[in-house]
Image (cartoon, helix red, strand yellow):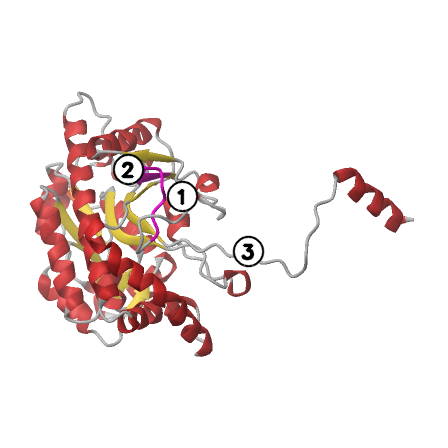
Amino acid sequence: MHKCLGITRTISRSFTSLPNFFKISEEVTESLSSNKPIVALESTVITHGLPFPENVKTATKVEEIVRQNNAIPATIGILNGKVYIGMNPTEMTSLALNKNVLKVSRRDLPYLISQCLSGGTTVAATMALAYRSGISVFATGGIGGVHRGGETSMDVSADLCELSRTPIAVFFNPETLGVCVAAFGASKDFPAFFTPKSNFKAPCNVESYEEAARLIDSRNQLQLESGILIAVPIPEEYHEQGLQTESVIEEALNEARERNILGRDVTPFVLKRVQELSGGAALEANIGLLQNNARVGAQIAVALNHLNSSRSGPISSRTLRSPVKQEAKDVFSSPSGRPVVIGGSILDIHVKTLEDVKPLHVNAIYREERKKSR
């Protein structure tokens, strides 16, 4: 029997419906019980996103920024088969220095738990674990989509599917999945990861923390099954570094193809290589956008908390999901607590035709098909 299966339960009695391999910090437990605003944070930035020691320093600084904006940070990761909801600096360092650490998506969670392994949680895994713990706001650097070359590799991130999680989920685009996508700011320009514009438009935009909170609250009251993605552009002061980074991404991707690096190994390789090729510009821009997203996420969580607190009656998202006030079987089934992701998005769209295509009128196509059938 694996030793991790018999660990001592360290979570409060209010959360008895959680499995015993969940380890919720005292700060997060107290915050959940007292309905304080909480912001979940991923841990792949520690394990695969940034080099040591910048990874731990950045993760610690991001938590500090969340606290400065009156919310409670909850960095989520897995150590030796235990799910940590709220990691301290020692635990973060242990994760960062682990030579066998894995990149963990939703699909990988059962394996890591059963084998007592350690891993950094991706957007999809962090969302799933945050939701399971009663946290509904999540700040990240960016979410994944269809990776370049996906038409042959079928390498598609689970992030958007997790945002839309229902008994049957079909991946196509945010609208099809029922995910509300909003740009944060005065413009509907959808931001790319390292630049403020991707040449695409978001369906809508929110111009303030309060407006974002009202959007989330409306989704909660409608009891929709999907999450919300709020895309935050990279701060103005990092535009130049972002442009330098964009110029070397294609070079890093070409190297990945030449080395036959596939699947989950592509992103860590490209991130590492881009940091090297950009002469530090990518690292500076990445840290800057992470910190800004944490700041925006914390402010939105606080605004949502104020909105919920000002309303009488048990219809706020936190009240509906409170383990103290609900039956255990209903705690994690309420759709009103679906996660909200604050951050950017990685957008890759490539279309190529193998030969010239001439548009034909539908009647001409019909006549051609009739000739062939004769």
Name the mark on residue 154.
Answer: none
Name the mark on residue 164.
Answer: 1
* Residue drawn at point x = 25 percent, y = 39 percent: 328
Query: Does the magenta-highlighted stretch encompass residue 186?
Result: yes
- Label 3, on which residue? 351
Q: Evaluate whether residue 22 shows in this view.
A: no
* Residue type, label 3: Val
* Residue drawn at point x = 24 percent, y = 47 percent: 138
* Residue drawn at point x = 31 percent, y = 69 percent: 274
* Residue type, label 2: Gly
Residue span colored magenta: 181-192
Return the x and y of residue 17 as percentages of the image width and height.
Answer: 23, 46
* Residue type, label 1: Ser
| Dot 3 alpha-carbon crowd within 10 angstroms: few under 14, some 14 to 19, many 20 or more | few
In this view, the residue farthest toward the right is 374
Vertical relation: 368 (above or below) 58: above
Query: Does the magenta-highlighted stretch encompass residue 316?
Result: no
Question: Which element carries disc 2, helix, strand or loop?
Answer: helix
